[in-house]
Image: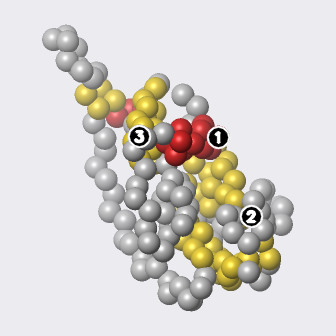
């Protein structure tokens, strides 16, 4: 199964166009689940997709008896949650659509995609998030000025974590 950003975007379009609220697909050990949620009052940003694949060593198939395969996962690690930084009134939060590693530039020797104070337009590439060996370009959905970059280069990010603050034009 191809779990790249274009595949996920296609699933989102199917979900948006239809009267269904949830799609879940599992192929080759990779599960993709897309859930349409009710829009929040002040949040015009679209909801995104989460996908996961079990660790290869974690899957164990029980023999005989026609039983379904059993999948065991390692115990979840506890992660200390950091409190979100205060948001200036009128700024827009650009959030991570996936879990992965945040990169400000396309390569270690290249200039960052954006800097604080830079004007951006809709479609401007802000960063890359590497997930499952795929480099996913994160684009800006707004026109405005980058006010703050909240993640350091090479830092792991969580789903829905605030990456940038943008002051709209």
Q: Nearer the viewer, mark 1 or mark 3?
A: 3
Q: Nearer the viewer, mark 1 or mark 2?
A: 2
Which numbered disc, 3 or 2, marks the residue that appears first in the sequence? Answer: 3
Tell whether 91 sits left or right of 126: left
What residue is shown at x 62% (from left), y 61% (from top)? Answer: 102
Vertical side of 87 occupied by 3: above or below:
above
What residue is shown at x 28% (from left), y 49% (from top)? Answer: 75
**Residue position for label 2:** 122
**Residue position for label 3:** 20
Q: CA distance from mark 3 to mark 2?
A: 28 Å
Tell whether 27 sits left or right of 153: left
What residue is shown at x 74% (from left), y 80% (from top)? Answer: 169
User: Can you give x and y, in whole percent of width and height, for residue 88 in the image?
Assistant: 57, 89
> Do labels 1 and 3 touch, CB within 8 Å?
no
> Do labels 3 and 2 touch, CB within 8 Å?
no
Vertical side of 102 occupied by 28: above or below:
above
Q: CA distance from mark 1 to mark 3?
A: 20 Å
- Viewport quadrant of the N terminus: top right
Pointer 1 local density, CA inside 10 Å: few below 14, some 14–19, many at least 20: few
Closer to us: 37 or 29:
37
**Residue position for label 1:** 6
Pointer 2 local density, CA inside 10 Å: few below 14, some 14–19, many at least 20: few
- What SS does tag 1 mark? helix
User: Can you give x and y, in whole percent of width and height, for residue 91 in the image?
Assistant: 61, 82
Q: CA distance from mark 1 to mark 2?
A: 18 Å
The residue at the far left in this view is 65
């Amino acid at each position: 199964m191809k779990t790249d950003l274009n595949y996920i975007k296609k699933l989102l379009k199917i979900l948006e166009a239809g009267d269904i609220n949830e799609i879940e697909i599992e192929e080759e050990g990779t599960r993709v689940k897309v859930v349409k949620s009710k829009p929040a009052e002040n949040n015009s940003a679209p909801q995104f997709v989460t996908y996961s694949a079990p660790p290869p060593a974690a899957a164990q198939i029980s023999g005989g008896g026609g039983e379904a395969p059993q999948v065991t996962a390692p115990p979840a690690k506890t992660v200390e949650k950091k409190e979100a930084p205060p948001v200036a009134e009128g700024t827009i939060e650009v959030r991570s659509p996936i879990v992965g590693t945040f990169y400000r530039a396309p390569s270690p020797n290249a200039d960052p995609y954006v800097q604080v104070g830079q004007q951006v337009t809709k479609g401007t590439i802000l960063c890359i998030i590497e997930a499952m060996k795929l480099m996913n370009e994160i684009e800006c959905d707004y026109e405005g000025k980058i006010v703050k970059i909240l993640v350091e280069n090479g830092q792991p990010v969580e789903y829905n974590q605030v990456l940038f603050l943008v002051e709209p034009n």
